[in-house]
Amino acid sequence: MNRLAILPSSSVPPPVAASAPPAVDPAEVAPEDWNDWRWQLRHSITTGEQLAALVTLTDDERAGIAAAPGLFRIGTTPYYFSLVDRAHPACPVRRQIIPTGLEARIRPEELEDPLGEETHNPTPALIHKYPDRVLLLAVDRCAIYCRHCNRRRLVGGDAPPTRDELEQAFDYIARTRRVRDVLISGGDPLCLSTAKLDYILTRLRQIPHVEIIRLGTRVPVVLPMRITGQGGDELVAMLRRHHPLFVNTHFNHARELTPLARAACEKLVDAGIPVGNQTVLLRGINSSVRSLRRLMRELIKTRVRPYYLFQGDTVAGTDHLRTSIETAQELMAGLRGWMSGMAVPQLVLDAPGGGGKIPIGPNHLVETHADRVVVRSYRGALVDYPQPLERDATVPYDEVFFAGEPEDDDREGGPDA
């Protein structure tokens, strides 16, 4: 394993450290320490001094680090930093860790809360934007603070949700029968202790109408030893007790799919936990057809299903990382049809202000007529597709199959959108 010099820190990433301790020779790091997820978090790299001791910073990176205090958090595990190509500032891992001066440039259109979450939170730790699902903010810490994070206003703080705030969230879910699906995020829920996460999952499983629970986590990417190392068996066994449970993770580049990261994903899948991936399209980092094809193919080989390809959110200080919509659609056109459909994610943008996820893939429907439509194939050919003669799509057996049940849109409680 390529264990770079790492620098000890006293705790899980503090807001800003005044200075950094001397670098530690990687040869002095025992394998049992390196593979201990708690050791990785205790030794998180959180300061410019630490970064400068590990890599020769560019002037642009130094400007970004200087602008960080008061604007955004820096932090990564030693493991994830070991994936950095120290010879190339364009390294996709490096660019997700180290800010540049452009991050201090904030456009008027950019927002601290780009998804309008703070207008959809019925309790302090809960967001309810969609009719049948909610987002539970279970923790305010991550193993890495990504340069493109859409929740940077919240993560890395010093005020995690209290037990009372979590209970308020559970009470809301319990009395809102419309909620079928709970996504646990934050922060990263796999940074919680196994016991704390078990408590949260147990409380949710006590609510009869909660059908699906999902975990949103980047731990398989940046801290895979949480799953493969000490305590990993206990964690996975606990998760299995709460099926149906799904994990959505966040690989952005094939460079992140190390043998250890693959092993973490496969361990979850072997436990019957489906793993999906949500990639953020990042300009200059993964914004090429070649890069995206490689990532999606490698994910499928690891039994991780590409789920979403996100157009970058309008987060304050991230304009330089976003591609144009036209570019995103062109990139997507280089995936669909050229790869197995299982390897093709859905291209979406998350509408500012809480509008939700909106598909923005290439439009293959060229013309619509009463008797036919004209579609464009993935190779660009125009093809006629005949319309059916009959248009009535009523399902007569619905009256039997759903007898006595209310319409889905009429379930009690929750917002209408």
Image (cartoon, helix red, strand yellow):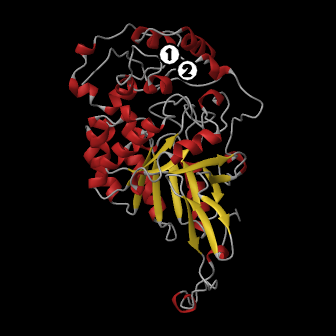
Of the numbered discs in the image, which one, if any, rests on residue 320?
Answer: none
Q: Residue at x 55, y 51 (%)?
A: 136
Position of residue 337 measured from the top left corner of the image (x, y, whole percent): 45, 54
Report the residue that reaches farthest toward the right.
Answer: 108
User: Toward the viewer: 275 or 257?
Assistant: 257
Mark 2 sits on what residue? 99
User: Toward the viewer: 76 or 19?
Assistant: 76
Q: Earlier in the sequence, mark 1 or mark 2?
A: 1
Q: Quadrant of the C terminus?
A: bottom right
Q: Residue at x 61, y 69 (%)?
A: 178
Q: Quadrant of the N terminus?
A: top left
In the image, residue 325 sits, relative to residue 413, either above or below, namely: above
In the image, residue 281 sits, relative to residue 234, either above or below, namely: above
Inspect the image, locate mark 1, and give the three-letter code of the amino acid beneath it. Thr
Of the numbered discs in the image, which one, if any, rests on residue 47?
Answer: 1
Position of residue 272 measured from the top left corner of the image (x, y, whole percent): 31, 59
User: Toward the viewer: 150 or 33?
Assistant: 150
Position of residue 69 measured from the top left corner of the image (x, y, whole percent): 62, 18
39 horizontally vs 162: left or right: left
218 horizontally vs 128: left or right: left
Badge 2 marks a residue whose secondary structure is loop
Badge 1 marks a residue whose secondary structure is loop
